[in-house]
Amino acid sequence: MNKKQIEQEFQKIGNEIKYNKPTNTPYPPDVIKRRELLLFAQVSLANMSDAKRKKDKQKEKLQEALYKTIMSNYYCWDKSK
């Protein structure tokens, strides 16, 4: 991913956190787990960005694969039940 794509992914995750909220509180356990995935994805994006800045291709590829796995689990949550 390039810097622009990483920034777009950060925005996408930010929008999911801000606008995709359940109406009932406290949040149900499955919603909490999905939101935890978004937090893990943010950490992975930050690590990817750091690896890119340090020109560490191996770490960058690892973090990108991790990010894609996390987001795949997030978007396919209902299918995995």
Image (cartoon, rainbow, N blue to C red):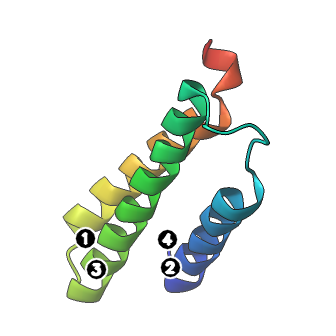
Does label 3 or label 4 sit earlier along the sequence? 4
Q: Which residue is mark 3?
A: 50
Q: Please tell me which residue lies in front, 34 or 29.
A: 29
Local secondary structure at mark 2 = loop
Q: Are marks 3 and 2 in contact (CB under 8 Å)?
A: no
Q: Amino acid at mark 3?
A: Asp
- Give the x, y percent position of residue 1: 49, 71
| N-term-proximal mark, 3 vs 2 | 2
Q: Are marks 3 and 4 in contact (CB under 8 Å)?
A: no
Real-space Cα distance between discs 4 and 1?
A: 11 Å
In this view, the mark in front (3 or 4): 3
Quadrant of res 43? bottom left
> Is the C-beta separation of discs 4 and 2 under 8 Å?
yes
Q: Which residue is mark 1?
A: 57
Q: Amino acid at mark 2?
A: Asn
3 vs 2, front mark: 3
Residue drawn where x is 73% and y is 49% of the image: 21
* Badge 4 amino acid: Met
State the quadrant of the C terminus. Answer: top right
Tell me how many marks there are.
Answer: 4
Residue wearing tag 4: 1
Per the image, label 1 sits on a secondary structure element best described as: helix
- Looking at the image, the residue that sits furthest to the top is 81
